[in-house]
Image (cartoon, grey):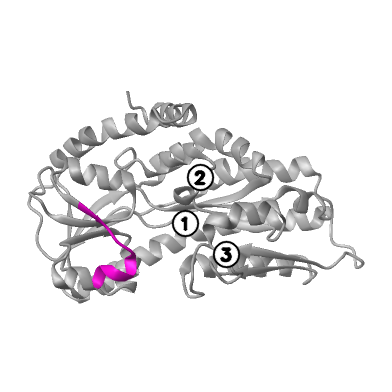
Amino acid sequence: MGKGINMDRRFLIKAIGGIALGAASASGVGPALAQDMPKVEWILTSTETTKGHHTVQDLQKFADGVAKRTDGRFTIRVALEGELGFKRDAYVRALQRNQIQMSTFDPGFLTAQVPHLGVFNLTFLQDGSLDQLMAIEEATRPMTVEAFRRLNAEPIAWFALTTQELISREPIENFVDLKGTKIRVWRELDAKLIEKMNGVPVYMPGSEVYTAMQRGVVTAANTGTPAMVDRSLHEVGKYLYRFGGPPASQYLVYNIQAFDSLPNAYKRALFQEGWALTDRAKRTVLDEDGKAVEVMTKAGVKEYQIPADQRAKLRELAGPLWDEWAAKDPQNAAALAAAKQALGLK
């Protein structure tokens, strides 16, 4: 099996310890709950649309944990995307207005407000492994925290989903020269890289990929392995390539004023469960990838690694795209420089 996002304990201590536990200490979280603590009800919005999605289930466990730690006096409702009448592009505004008190912020959809978060979408800057992904998040974290605070938000946890792989209906012999192969994409930088690989990027919603592959509108699709199974792509594509594209990741944030109004014991419950969420999510993403690959293998899908020499060439092709992105905003340039330094790149 290819590499997943393996967020180990070392990451938790450095990342969530720095964000959550440090803030908990600063807030002066107090001792055990008193019987007369107020009842508080918060809303947390997810970027997913089904309760069965593993990130929603992890968020629900987070909410259940907070309720348990506060004897049911501090409850958090986990709302699906669209359930409250708006989608993720309105989450920042809703959080600022205190319509919601917590939300998952997807860097891929937040670049309009926080441009430097696009560093997570730079293909082949990192390989999807724990050490490299952790290095990028840690290197850019001070910028991210500062930017979120300008939005009246503070991060309490961060976690990633599975890396973006390729599933194809036909074998791909050379990734450096795709010879006009049409590949479904959903991110601009991925599309630009596919073009440099002599492929043809095709934007389309995930819900349309099955039919498009079945009819030959596209030959391959770029997505995570659980999504491949959810959309039954293993029925129309029998070649799984470990492309190792940037995984989607999410910050769990809270409204600063709403947080400041909480009793110290409730703040402590949030931080403790934020730690547990990240610890749980690192196992979940590996489990989800493993289960998806098992399903696809049983359906006759063959798994392949991209040859090292081809992967090295793809990284060379991606480099100018990183620089192009960095030139769009000084914060982008700072984020790329920090990430490169952390990864030991020139």
269 relative position to 168: left or right: right
Q: Dot 3 surroundings within 10 Å: few (below 14), some, or many (20 or more)?
A: few
The residue drawn where x is 78% and y is 44% is 27
Badge 3 vs badge 2, beta-carbon distance below 8 Å: no
Badge 2 vs badge 1, beta-carbon distance below 8 Å: yes
Region rendered in magenta:
201-210
| Position of residue 195 measured from the top left corner of the image (x, y, whole percent) | 19, 44
| Position of residue 106 measured from the top left corner of the image (x, y, whole percent) | 49, 52
Amino acid bearing label 1:
Lys
The residue drawn where x is 49% and y is 30% is 331
| Residue beneath disc 2 | 11
| Position of residue 121 measured from the top left corner of the image (x, y, whole percent) | 38, 44
Above or below, 315 against 170 in this view is above
Q: Is residue 345 magenta?
A: no
| Residue beneath disc 3 | 86
| Position of residue 105 measured from the top left corner of the image (x, y, whole percent) | 54, 52
| Residue beneath disc 1 | 282
Work out whether mark 2 precedes mark 1 in sequence or the reverse, and give the earlier one.
Answer: 2
| Depth order, front residue of 69/99 | 99
